[in-house]
Amino acid sequence: MGFLNIEKRNQSERKPLKRIQDWDEYRLVMPEAEVRQQAARCMDCGTPYCQIGTVLNRGTTGCPIHNLIPEWNDLVYRGLWREAYDRLIKTNNFPEFTSRACPAPCEGSCTAGIVSDPVSIKSVERSIIEHAFAEGWVVPKPPLRRTDKKIAVIGSGPAGMACADQLNKIGHNVTVFERSDRAGGLLMYGIPSMKIEKDVVDRRVRLLEDEGIVFKTGVDVGKDITESELRAEFDAVVLCTGAGKHRDVPIEGRQLSGVLPAMDYLTASNRHLLYQEPLLPDLDAHGKKVIVIGGGDTGEDCVATAIRQGCKSVVQFGKHGQLPGKRVENNPWPEHPNVFSLDYAYHEAEELFGKDPRAYYVETKKFLGNASGHVTSLMTGSFKSETVAEKKWDADLVLIAIGFKGAEDRLFDDFQIDRDPSGRKVQANDQDYQTSEDGVFAAGDVRRGATLIVWAIEEGRRAAASVAMYLDRKPSPLVNE
Ligand SMILES: Cc1cc2nc3c(=O)[nH]c(=O)nc-3n(C[C@H](O)[C@H](O)[C@H](O)COP(=O)(O)OP(=O)(O)OC[C@H]3O[C@@H](n4cnc5c(N)ncnc54)[C@H](O)[C@@H]3O)c2cc1C
Ligand code: SF4
């Protein structure tokens, strides 16, 4: 009942004007005494909505991996960190990723949130896993016995890593194929290091390698190794290739240089930091007027990146209006609350430039350029009203962050698998994750559409369980006994 007299606190954040001078994580782990107090706010509800993990009104409600939240809250409150860690990893393969970047749908459906502020679940989760790493509890645990079964997981994002982890734990031989030169999927080259530092991703990949999973990076499946070669070598294949096909803005002037997809920009920035690779001028926001088209999280990460690169100004166009200050009637608890918040990038922009960079209902009509074919400005109207006059905005760099269309077309041809009715995702249900091809499974963004790390982990885990059952139907003599 601590929520009655203890105020909610979250992981504290480094000061915006200070943190924009580097690329380190902007959130800090909560001190131990404080996190124990925060955990005491949990009511240990009979029906813990925080862990239901479902979709209500098209939004995620509760924790999709069904983290045992009230149990570990109580253990943390009592200072039983080891036990809390053991409970946490029963459901979550990678708490160090979720506790940094998850939007915490668990908190949106926390019962305390009906009458007060929800429990700081994500902060408690982060403290548990950081505590475990600091204490040396997170060590490789290779399986004691190996089967003779071989599984190929294509894609090393959170879905692929979770799937590989689960299958390896039961002794199967797992190889993860990754097109990029580094494992981690969007955790490595999409999400900026202010949210998840890259050594946090490398650390987990090393642990998985030490447990026996083979990562083959720089291998583009479909080109460097064909589907039939894979099928000949492996007993099952799991596609965890993400939803990398991005949406575009096919309007006049789109071909101008300086107008580019957000992912090209974010990937280049991450590579620049990891390898000190020079940034091409078009991928560097330094001294530029930047416009980000798209009001979502990818757009927000572009804002934060442009600020760190030293942009002159930044504006982010959203299609929709500003969210309300509190829940509206058609968004009741336990749904995830769609309410206004000043997330990290907006806070930084406000402190640096004196205003929130977001502009609402903005429809981009055309891009204008100079004689050398570089963008100089763009024209906009309004998604809300046709009577709003067209407006001209100066721009030297325009980043398109309006979401993802889904799986890459090549995949369907390479693997001869069916599309779902939308045509954008791989057809496979969330019971067996089996595609239209026997022995080929799909999990994560490629099956679900662009979503969250926590859903990708859940999909990877469930697909692994289905693969294990599929393999059980084949005789599986144990080797290395
Ligand atoms: C900019 C950005 C910020 C985000 N921020 C957040 C956030 O804060 N919180 C959150 O919860 N979610 C966030 N997300 C969403 C989250 O990153 C994704 O939902 C998640 O990474 C999906 O995991 P996945 O494993 O399905 O796919 P991915 O992470 O996309 O991994 C797929 C992998 O497959 C590889 N691949 C593709 N084709 C092939 C092939 N033919 N051969 C070999 N390898 C191949 C790709 O190179 C890639 O590494 C963000 C997404 C973006 C783009
Ligand atoms: S993974 Fe996300 S939803 Fe689940 S407990 Fe952690 S922060 Fe909450």
Image (cartoon, rainbow, N blue to C red):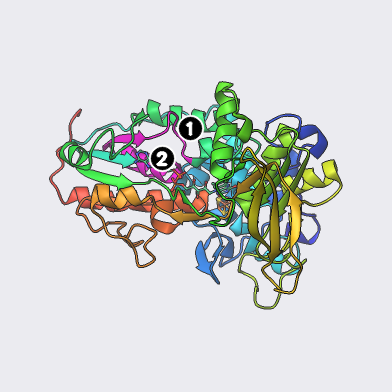
Residue 171, magenta (yes or no): yes
What kind of residue is marked 1?
A: Arg
Taking the spot 26% from the left edge, 45% from the top edge, the residue there is 237
Quarter in which the N terminus is drawn: bottom right
Secondary structure of residue under mark 1: helix
Q: Position of residue 91 (x, y in %)?
A: 46, 49
| Residue 450 visible somewhere in the drawing | no
**Nearer to us in this view, 85 or 154:** 154
Residue linked to disc 2: 161
- Judge by depth and name the residue closer to the eye, 83 or 198: 198
| Percent coordinates x, y for residue 363 in the rendering | 66, 62
> In the rendered structure, which segment of residues is drawn in magenta?
156-185
Could you tell me residue 440's position as x and y percent?
A: 25, 50
Which residue does the numbered mark 1 point to in the structure image?
A: 204
Disc 2 element: helix
Residue 287 part of the magenta segment: no
The furthest residue to the top: 276
Residue 346 drawn above or below residue 149: below
Q: Are marks 1 and 2 in contact (CB under 8 Å)?
A: yes
From where the camera sits, is residue 456 visible? yes
